[in-house]
């Protein structure tokens, strides 16, 4: 009798915790699984609950990746960084919002970020400043050709 009630208790705890977490924001399956494991819930219970929530449409890695990518884009991150972060969360497909943007649009985003951070002054003769700005944009996840194009822009 103790095992059955313990199993029911774990199932209830997993479902309620997962639902509370999903009510706050979208989560990937991996994130939700890790958070439930921290609550000392058995792996088989976690997998069963997450499978049920995926079937219900409450947990969706594709929707999570789209929301996550849009938030990171709004914060000024480039496609390489966003994709790398998604891969760390076990999302191995590119969200639609990233695929929809052309290279020219990514360059425009890099230019806007550069303008906000450094201004658009002419840096063709200032190698140190050019390297500093290029490193900043590269750390933000922009590809090298996007960085070069953004650095060529002037007022």
Image (cartoon, rainbow, N blue to C red):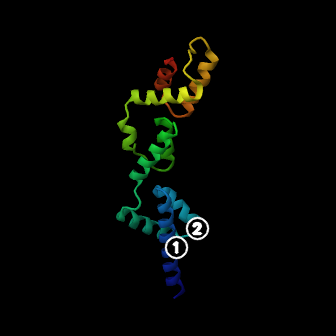
| Extreme residue in the bottom direction | 1
The outermost residue toward the right is 128
Q: Position of residue 96 (x, y in %)?
A: 36, 43
Q: What residue did someone put label 2 on?
A: 39
Q: How many marks?
A: 2
The residues tagged by marks 2 and 1 sit, at their Cα atoms, a distance apart of 9 Å
Q: For residue 103, what is the image quadrant?
A: top left
- Residue 65 in the image, given as x and y percentages of width and height: 43, 48
Q: Which residue is mark 1?
A: 13
| As drawn, 30 above or below 78 | below
Which numbered disc flags the more N-terminal residue, 2 or 1?
Answer: 1
- Is 2 situated left or right of 50 in this image? right
Look at the numbered disc 2 and give the secondary structure of its residue.
loop
Residue sitting at 53 percent across and 80 percent down? Answer: 6
152 relative to 19, above or below: above
Residue 8: image x %, image y %? Answer: 48, 79
């Amino acid at each position: 009798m103790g095992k059955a009630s313990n199993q029911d208790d774990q199932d209830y705890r997993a479902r309620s915790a997962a639902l509370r977490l999903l009510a706050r924001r979208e989560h990937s399956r991996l994130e939700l699984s890790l958070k439930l494991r921290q609550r000392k819930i058995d792996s088989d219970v976690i997998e069963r609950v997450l499978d049920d929530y995926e079937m219900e449409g409450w947990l969706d890695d594709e929707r999570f990746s789209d929301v996550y990518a849009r938030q990171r884009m709004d914060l000024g991150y480039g496609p390489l960084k966003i994709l790398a972060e998604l891969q760390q969360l076990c999302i191995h497909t590119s969200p639609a919002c990233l695929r929809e943007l052309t290279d020219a649009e990514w360059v425009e985003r890099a230019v806007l970020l550069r303008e906000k951070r450094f201004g658009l002054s002419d840096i063709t003769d200032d190698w140190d400043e050019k390297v500093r700005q290029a490193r900043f944009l590269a750390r933000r996840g922009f590809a090298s050709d996007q960085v070069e194009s953004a650095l060529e822009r002037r007022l």
